[in-house]
Amino acid sequence: MYGWQVAAPGRDVRRALRRTPMFVPRPGPGELLVVVDACGVCRTDLHVASGELPPRRPSVVPGHEIVGHVLEPGAGAEGFRPGDRVGIAWLRETCGRCRFCLRGDENLCPDSRYTGWDADGGYADCTTVRADFAYVLPDGYDDAELAPLLCAGIIGYRALRRTELPPGGRLGIYGFGASAHLTAQIAIAEGATVHVLTRSEQARKLALELGAASAGEAYDAPPEPLDAAVLFAPVGDLVPVALRALDRGGTLAVAGIYLTDIPSLEYERDLFQERTVRSVTANTRADGRELLAFAAKHRLTVATTPYPMSRAADALVDLAADRVNGAAVLLPKTS
């Protein structure tokens, strides 16, 4: 089989990746060998390739928004049979024994491992996953539509819950890419008023098409005070901007795994009146199951830009340059 490896992490993303022949992995005990049918391209992949997130495994294969089908279950793997469609997300495994796992916060497990960072991911023909970390996928979506749900969707869902947005509340979304365009639809379906702030004119158009009440420039003030906000753009300068847009008692959730430095905050202007900043770290399997159950009941519009797997480097370069509308998705069977 072939896979894309992060051979030389650096600012030149195209040179960082190398497509190379690889051995087909063998599923270990409790694992599934999965043929990759689609793999979403996430900004986290970009951070791994650029070295902003140093790979934890030399020449790791990135990709953690994976839709595929089971080729072979390993010994003791339960719940799936050959041919079953499965989803593989960022969280690969946890210890299951620490205080964080035992209280339901497995995303904070000190021994957690991640697909496409600690272990080879989906920029390849095949990969593996622990059966108990694989997802059953909803009907009514094709492979390319499902792939972004497995990180962009899950992280956006968790970030939205972290804001504690009140029923019928006013939500601000800063940045409007793969994750944000799904989060906006969830919030709107639940009765929120959504205001989108992003530098991309194309993204602002998409936001309005999906039902946002307004769409402005990233540094603009929204047309009304916000009860909550989610920052998707990895731009620390937007933290005080978003905080100042919050009404009293509002919460800002920062959704990315990487963020540029946050400038100094002014207490009275940015944080006073019980405004709160909360980070988002990975996801739990419960988040994933809840998001996929929501997607089964509420048909989400998943904006995708398809790329053949042979153009994975191009997809990352386009993502870095903000040339992707919605989510880029790699399709191995596309030439």
Image: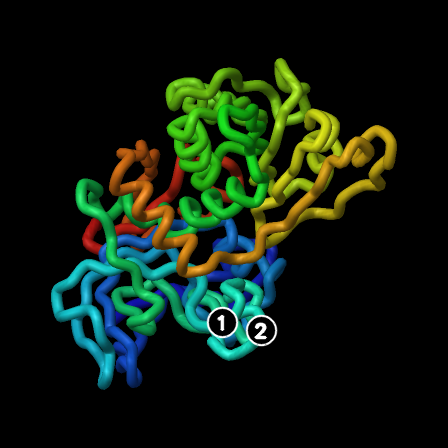
Q: Secondary structure at mark 1?
A: strand
Residue 299, image x and y in percent? 27, 34
* In the image: residue 15, left or right of residue 293: right
Q: Nearer the viewer, residue 26 or 136?
A: 136
Residue 9 rendering spot, x and y as whole percentages: 56, 64
Residue 246 location (% of width, % of height): 69, 27
- Vertical placement of residue 105 versus 182, above or below: below
In this figure, which residue is indicated by the disc labeled 1?
113
Q: Residue at x 70, y 32 (%)?
A: 249
Residue 196 appears anywhere in the view: no
- Residue plotted at (25% across, 58% down): 136
Q: Residue at x 49, y 67 (%)?
A: 117
Choose top left, top right, bottom left or bottom right for residue 209. top left
Please tell me in which quadrant of the rendered image residue 11 appears: bottom right
Answer above or below: position of 90 versus 200: below
| Residue bearing mark 2 | 99
Amino acid type, callout 2:
Arg
Q: Secondary structure at mark 2?
A: helix
Q: Report the front residue among 304 and 97.
A: 97
List the single residue furthest toward the top: 223
